[in-house]
Image (tube, helix red, strand yellow):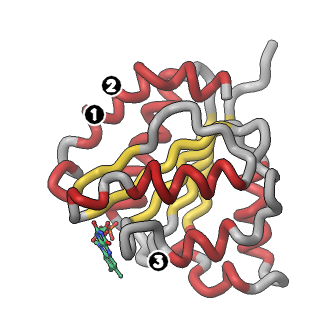
Amino acid sequence: MAAPVRIVTVVGNPRPASRTHGLARTLAAEIANVLQGATVGEADLALLGPRVLDQADAGAAAAVGEVLAADVLVVASPTYKATYSGLLKAFLDRLATGSLAGKAAVPLLLGGAPNHQLAVDVHFTPLLLELGAAVPVRGLFVLESDVDGFASFAATWATANGAALARG
Ligand SMILES: Cc1cc2nc3c(=O)[nH]c(=O)nc-3n(C[C@H](O)[C@H](O)[C@H](O)COP(=O)(O)O)c2cc1C
């Protein structure tokens, strides 16, 4: 029997318990609903803060381990300066180029400016591809005004895209 799919969220908001964090958890839970037996973990970078820059930090190393053990990654960030947060980039810089090979990733940005919607495809997806992840479906840009409706959107989205993520 195939091993259960491991889904891990990576949340790049420097503030704990953020809306970005909530969106990532919601999406991961909906993907897990679609992929029978899937388990969910997380790397919440708000809990690490500047420690992501410390190569000797055990918590940061554990978060990297969590990411490397995933089959499917939900990588979420607030939109900062039309891209993703510096905290997320600093964390991902710990990973070797190509080290996410064999994993599927879903980039998710939360932002306030509709004119930054393409940031997820133009800036975020290339970062994940550089790390070796497959990005089999388009990334998600969630407007702040759409946060309240995200749970039902995520359920529909996961039904449509869950299988593609499991295939990698
Ligand atoms: C430093 C900073 C830069 C931001 N830059 C952008 C931006 O370029 N485009 C945008 O749509 N929103 C921008 N925002 C708004 C955030 O994306 C938005 O407030 C955030 O996604 C809310 O997520 P949260 O509730 O999880 O913190 C910025 C916010 C901050 C604090």
Q: Quadrant of residue 38?
A: top right
The residue indicated by pointer 1 is 153
In whole angstroms, how far apart are the C-alphas of marks 3 and 1?
A: 25 Å
Q: Quadrant of the N terminus?
A: top right
Q: Amino acid at mark 3?
A: Pro
Q: Amino acid at mark 1?
A: Phe
Please tell me which residue is depicted at 61% across the width and 45% down the height of the picture.
Answer: 73
Most distant residue in the top direction: 1
Residue 70 lies left or right of residue 58; in this view the side is left
Q: Secondary structure at mark 3?
A: loop
Give yes or no for contact between labels 2 and 1 (Cβ–Cβ under 8 Å).
Answer: yes
In whole angstroms, how far apart are the C-alphas of marks 3 and 2?
A: 29 Å
| Location of residue 54 with respect to 71 vertically, above or below | below
Q: Earlier in the sequence, mark 3 or mark 1?
A: 3
Q: Quadrant of ligand 1?
A: bottom left
Residue 60, position in %: x, y? Answer: 72, 73
Q: Secondary structure at mark 1?
A: helix
Residue 51, position in %: x, y? Answer: 67, 84
Q: Which mark is residue 14?
A: 3
In whole angstroms, how far apart are the C-alphas of marks 2 and 1?
A: 5 Å
Out of 106 and 8, give the one closest to the viewer. 106
Out of 40 and 82, give the one closest to the viewer. 82
Q: Secondary structure at mark 2?
A: helix
Q: Quadrant of the C terminus?
A: top right
Q: Earlier in the sequence, mark 3 or mark 2?
A: 3
Q: Quadrant of residue 160?
A: top left
The residue indicated by pointer 2 is 156
Q: Amino acid at mark 2?
A: Thr
Residue 31 lies left or right of residue 7; in this view the side is left
Please tell me which residue is depicted at 32% across the width and 25% down the height of the picture.
Answer: 156
| Location of residue 130 with respect to 33 vertically, above or below | below
Give yes or no for contact between labels 3 and 1 (Cβ–Cβ under 8 Å).
Answer: no
